[in-house]
Amino acid sequence: MRDETTVAIIGAGPAGLTLANLLQRSGVDCVVLEMRDRSYVEDRQRAGIIDHHAGRIFEEYGLADRIVGDGPVETLMEIRTEGVPRFLDTPALAGGRPSRLVPQQMLVRRLIAAFLEGGGDLRFGAAGVTLHDLDGPQPRVTYDGGELGAAYLAGCDGFHGVSRRSIPAGALETYSFDHGIGWYTVLADAPPPRYPLMGVSRHGFAAQFARGPHASRFYLQYQPGEDPRSWPDEHAWEQLRLRLGDPRLVAGPITGREIVEMRSFVAEPMDFGRLFLVGDAAHIITPMGAKGMNLALSDAYVLAQGLTDAVLKGDEAGLREYSAVCLRRTWDYQEFSRWYAEMVHQAGDESEPFRRKLALARLDRLFTSPAAATAFADLMAGTD
Ligand code: RFL
């Protein structure tokens, strides 16, 4: 069976679904092909924060109530150094630009519902997706049981997807970096912290973030060579209490566990012929600063605008700029994330005393220099 559409979108994660909704709102025809089934996609729990910049995208398209909702806005954030708390009012420092707590699976569910209610064509279980004729005038996608011709392709299929791999070797420059930091992350039915909480400690870094009214995501740095999956849960809770400086931290049933090895990756450019890479398909970033999902949403916004101008006005200028515009923000956020990760990990690392002092100076500056705090808050809120 062969169908035609204007934009074929590969992948129904935050990037693909945002792009699909923005195109639908703009009157541009698209089809989304997702290899997994709906319940798998809707239950995948990862990120939790929509920064102010990404939130405004949905506002501009009249989707804010539907997609962002009225979940709690970020107020203060807490950095606890060896148990001593300090707070930053990042939204105020950023000129009144709060981020909002929206767990990724909730965002994905809302995006799916909105797209389908608007009559969108979203095909789950599309296995064997293969891209063809990327740099010709009529690219197409085949998958088990179907073929889709399109004017443009959007590769929104994450880091391990097929889109980036379909680009001929040599057409992309890729940059990879291993930050040398490993985190054990657990999702637990445990009361969320009052404010997003980071613990800088000589026992290792730890963090706790809200993931709903009764759930928290915890992060625990582990040392190279350790296998935290073999830790008894009680050990993880003990370490969290120690590193967060909170002997009364309430434990709860652990509902998910993952290892996060802090890696960064960027592919340049983010397009090839009529294929555009969006979100994790083009870049991954460490969770420090919570920018991964936000970058995916921002890419989708830039691409939606470029595609809309191309399709409705015959003006491809926005598409030609797509890669450069998104890469500028991507590298900005990569630098921010690296800077942030170094600071909170090295500030507790007694094995490197000089580096530790530098990191502590960097951290102190956030609480003593309004200029430094404002620059930090600006990136937390998200940039154009
Ligand atoms: P996704 O979410 O990976 O979605 C890609 C979709 O494409 C599908 N797919 C295919 N479909 C068809 N054919 C193929 N061949 C396909 N191959 C793949 C997949 O099934 C999937 O549905 O990419 P997208 O949309 O670019 O979104 C990126 C975000 O998901 C990612 O950046 C964040 O989750 C990263 N991240 C965080 N980001 C934040 O902004 N704040 C956070 O606090 C945060 N925490 C995290 C995170 C990522 C984590 N992990 C494990 C990766 C915490 C964790 C633990």
Image (cartoon, helix red, strand yellow):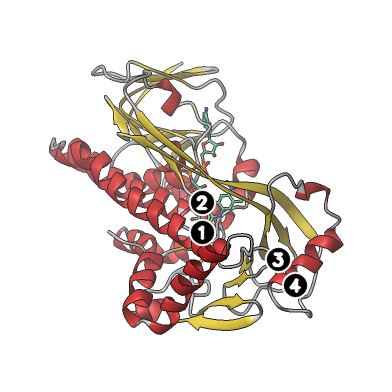
**Can residue 262 be seen at all in this image of the molecule?**
yes
At mark 4, the secondary structure is helix
Residue at point 50%, 22% (across, down): 129
Mark 2 vs mark 1, foreground winner is: 1
Image location of residue 295, percent across then percent down = 40, 51
Q: Is mark 2 within 8 Å of ligand 1?
A: no
Mark 3 / mark 4, whichever is N-terminal: 3
Q: Quadrant of residue 96?
A: bottom left
350 left or right of 19 in image:
right
> Is residue 283 depicted above or below 241 in this figure?
above
Tags 3 and 4 in contact by the CB under 8 Å rule? Answer: yes
List the residue tagged with mark 4.
242
Mark 2 residue type:
Thr
Image location of residue 213, percent across then percent down = 65, 72
> Is residue 353 depicted above or below 283 in this figure?
below
Front-most of residues 62 and 14 = 14
Residue at point 58%, 60% (across, down): 352
Q: Give the crowd class for mark 2: few <14, some 14-19, many >=20 residues within 10 Å.
A: many
List the residue tagged with mark 2.
286
Mark 2 vs mark 4, foreground winner is: 4
Mark 3 residue type:
His
Q: Give the crowd class for mark 1: few <14, some 14-19, many >=20 residues within 10 Å.
A: many
Mark 2 / mark 4, whichever is N-terminal: 4
Q: Is mark 3 within 8 Å of ligand 1?
A: no
Front-most of residues 162 and 263 = 263
